[in-house]
Amino acid sequence: MAAAIASLKELYQAKEDLEHLKKHHEDLYEQLLHVVSLTRQLQIKYGYMASIVMDEEDLPGYRPQFVRDSILTLYQQEVEALKNHQDINEVKAIMHKHRNISDSKLFLLILGMKPELLQGSTIIK
């Protein structure tokens, strides 16, 4: 599933919103960064993480095929811990606001990628 091409302005707005989250909800941001990093390290699709966080029903479409069930269970526990944070609605609001930017691009911004590197590129799931 290819995402729509995000404009540089949209990417900078998302980055600004993420910086605001980091400044005003540091513990939530650190937990989000942890889960995004874990997602990348385990080579799990960002859409899977986003679907869990946003309580979407499309998990089978994103479910990792080559991750052991025991590892996937540990991963899901980490995402659930993030979801149980008292301010998780701040993250959900950012994800909803920037739904035109792919989950991949939004999460790569969290990992520190520059908006200029993400503009116009197509990242799969």
Image (spheres, rainbow, N blue to C red):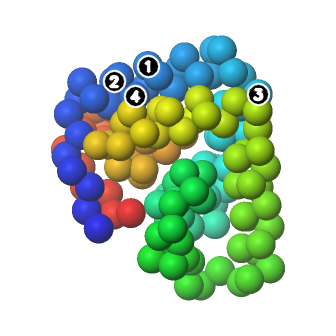
Q: Nearer the viewer, residue 43 or 75?
A: 75
Horizontally, is 8 left or right of 41 in the view? left
Q: Quadrant of residue 70?
A: bottom right
Q: Using the rendered view, name the quadrant where residue 2 is placed.
A: bottom left
Q: What is the C-alpha distance between the residues marked 1 and 4?
A: 5 Å
Real-space Cα separation, disc 3 to disc 2, in angstroms: 22 Å
Tell me the kind of residue under disc 4.
Ala
Residue that badge 2 annotates: 12
Q: Residues within 10 Å of mark 3 (few under 14, many from 20)?
A: some
**Label placed on residue 14:** 4
Amino acid type at circle 1 is Glu
Q: Nearer the viewer, residue 62 or 92?
A: 92
Disc number placed over residue 16 in the picture, else none: 1
Label number found at residue 27 = 3
Picture residue at 70% right of the left edge, 54% below the top: 79
SS label for mark 2? helix
Mark 2–mark 4 Cα distance, whole angstroms, equals 5 Å
Q: Pick the quarter of the image with the C terminus.
A: bottom left
Q: CA distance from mark 1 to mark 2?
A: 6 Å
Q: Amino acid at mark 3?
A: Asp
| Mark 2 surroundings within 10 Å by alpha-carbon count, few (fewer than 14), some (14 through 19), many (20 or more) | some
Kindly indicate whether the residue at mark 4 contacts the one at mark 1 (C-beta within 8 angstroms). Answer: yes
27 relative to 95, above or below: above
**Element carrying mark 1:** helix
Rendering coords of residue 120 (x, y %) = 19, 44
Kind of residue at badge 2 = Tyr
Q: Residue at x 23, y 40 (%)?
A: 6
Labels 1 and 2 touching (C-beta < 8 A)? yes
Per the image, label 3 sits on a secondary structure element best described as helix
Q: Which of the two discs, 4 and 3, labels the residue nearer the N terminus? A: 4
Choose between 33 and 96: the one closer to the eye.
96
